[in-house]
Amino acid sequence: MTGQRGADAPSRRAVLGALGAAGLAASGLAGCTGTPAERVGSAQTAELLTSRLPLPARFRTALPIPPMKEASRSDAAGEHHEIVQRVAAAEIMRFTVARKASDDSEIPRTLADAEPVDPSTAAVHREWNFTRGIVHGQRGWTINGRAFHPHRMDARPRLGELEVWRFFTDLHHPVHVHLSSFRVLSRNGGPPRRCDAGWKDTVDVRPAEYVDVAIRFIRFPGRFMMHCHNLEHEDMAMMAAFETVR
Ligand SMILES: [Cu+2]
């Protein structure tokens, strides 16, 4: 966040950034400043908004979190628990707009030129199926029916080659890939959503959906991860390791 918690702010444009580490990251900051806000960047794990602050005003930025019941967990004794998230909103920051300031800032119509990718040049297509499954004999979450194992490489992408990865889901899974950002090509075979534009580190795959992304790993050979960004799911084995090779 720019500014400080509870601090005075001038009446000019503010940029609010939030890095999310919630169990389920389906949340948003939109509208929280009391003035129209525009999204200038987003991934599932981070959101960037800008808004011109009115004078005088006091407002709080709150993070609305939809009520949800999601995830289940088995504890060490094998006992099964449903996790119910009841938080409706969390207050994360308070502003007092206390002094006038000139501001002729404008948001450009185009924020950045993301170079086009041509999926027809992809060297490899891979499919990743995010579903409930059995993890060490208990209910958990799996990718392609398998629980995470740190020494098993589930893919070996060649550095520099374009790949198309298709993510299938049973329920809602925000899919996060380490090392390289990717571009969302399509959802359920149709066009991507508006929020899919630009480079992404995570794609929010909705229940019973499949999403195609184009990804190219460059520079670093080694072992990396992909996983569902829902903490309860990644903690219950919904991760896969892959190794980039030359
Ligand atoms: Cu998940």
Image (spheres, rainbow, N blue to C red):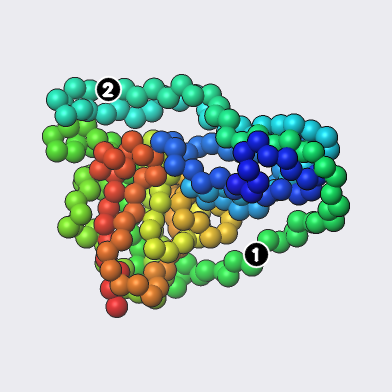
**Is disc 2 surrounded by few (<14), some (14 to 19) or many (20+) residues within 10 Å?**
few
Residue 101 or 34: which is nearer the viewer? 101
Residue 223 visible somewhere in the drawing: yes
Q: Amino acid at mark 1?
A: Ala
- The residue shown at (85%, 56%) is 104
* Residue, far bottom: 246
Look at the numbered disc 1 and give the secondary structure of its residue. Answer: loop
Q: Amino acid at mark 2?
A: His
In percent of width and height, residue 22 lies at 44, 37
- The residue shown at (58%, 70%) is 115
- Up-down relation of residue 27 to residue 215 (above or below): above
Does label 1 or label 2 sit earlier along the sequence? 2
Residue highlighted by disc 2: 81
Residue 6 or 64: which is nearer the viewer? 6
Give the numbered dot on residue 112: 1
- Up-down relation of residue 230 to residue 76 (above or below): below
**Is disc 1 surrounded by few (<14), some (14 to 19) or many (20+) residues within 10 Å?**
few
- Up-down relation of residue 106 to residue 139 (above or below): below
Judge from the rendering whether residue 27 lies leftward or rightward of residue 73; answer left or right. Answer: right
Q: Residue 142, located in which quarter of the rendered image?
A: top left
Judge from the rendering whether residue 46 lies leftward or rightward of residue 208; answer left or right. Answer: right
- The residue shown at (59%, 66%) is 114
Judge from the rendering whether residue 104 lies leftward or rightward of residue 196; answer left or right. Answer: right
User: In what quadrant of the picture does the C terminus appear?
Assistant: bottom left
Ligand 1 within 8 Å of disc 2? The answer is no
Look at the numbered disc 2 and give the secondary structure of its residue. Answer: strand
- The residue shown at (58%, 38%) is 28
Residue 36 visible somewhere in the drawing: no
Q: CA distance from mark 1 to mark 2?
A: 45 Å
In percent of width and height, residue 238 lies at 29, 44
In percent of width and height, residue 42 lies at 57, 50
Q: Give the number of marks.
A: 2
